[in-house]
Image (tube, helix red, strand yellow):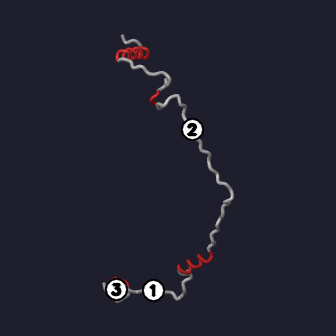
């Protein structure tokens, strides 16, 4: 098969210089302004900032600060005082604690014997 037309084969088109074809640019001027012109136009029509003056003759609000004190009955922290804050705790012996534990266990679970 013989290649008579250069457009039938890309190699022939390249050899003939057809692959390097560049379309001519239109002669119409661009309708879009340049970025510099847009920037200048925007800055000319931009609204100027408005400064709002506050009334300095008016007293500014200041919250009332009160320092509260705890009652002077005890200086120990709450977690150290426990629930019976007025009565001092007596230390129980191991035997007394075991006896109370067994009594509580019997109340909860019943007698296991």
Q: Quadrant of the C terminus?
A: top left
Of the image marks 2 and 3, the number of the one nearer the N terminus: 3
Please identify the residue farthest to the front as the structure is shown: 72
Q: Residue at x 62, y 45 (%)?
A: 64
**C-beta proximity under 8 Å, tags 2 and 3:** no
Give the foreground label among 3 and 1. 1
Most foreground residue, 101 or 45 = 101
Of the image marks 2 and 1, the number of the one nearer the N terminus: 1
Classify residue 110 as left or right of residue 48. left
Question: Residue 88's spot in the image, x, y percent?
Answer: 45, 22
- For residue 57, the mark is none
Q: Residue at x 50, y 23 (%)?
A: 86
**C-beta proximity under 8 Å, tags 2 and 1:** no
Residue matched to label 2 = 68
Give the foreground label among 2 and 1. 2
Classify residue 100 as left or right of residue 30. left
Quick one: label 1, few (<14), some, or many (20+) residues within 10 Å? few
Q: Residue at x 68, y 56 (%)?
A: 58
Q: Secondary structure at mark 1?
A: loop
Most foreground residue, 24 or 31 = 31
Question: Residue 12's spot in the image, x, y percent?
Answer: 33, 86
Residue matched to label 3 = 14
Query: Mark 2 and mark 1: span between their CA atoms?
Result: 88 Å
Residue matched to label 1 = 23
Number of marks in picture? 3
Query: Mark 3 and mark 1: span between their CA atoms?
Result: 16 Å
Question: Residue 69's spot in the image, x, y percent?
Answer: 55, 36
Q: Secondary structure at mark 2?
A: loop
| The quadrant where residue 101 appears | top left
Q: Quadrant of the N terminus?
A: bottom left
């Amino acid at each position: 098969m013989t290649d008579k037309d250069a457009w039938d084969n890309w190699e022939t088109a390249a050899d003939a210089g057809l692959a390097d074809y560049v379309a001519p640019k239109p002669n119409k001027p661009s309708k879009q302004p340049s970025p510099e012109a847009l920037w200048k136009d925007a800055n000319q029509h931009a609204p100027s900032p408005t400064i709002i003056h506050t009334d300095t003759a008016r007293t500014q609000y200041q919250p009332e600060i009160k320092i509260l004190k705890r009652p002077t009955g005890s200086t120990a922290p709450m977690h150290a005082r426990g629930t019976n804050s007025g009565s001092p705790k007596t230390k129980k012996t191991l035997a007394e604690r075991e006896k109370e534990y067994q009594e509580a266990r019997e109340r909860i679970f019943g007698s296991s014997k």
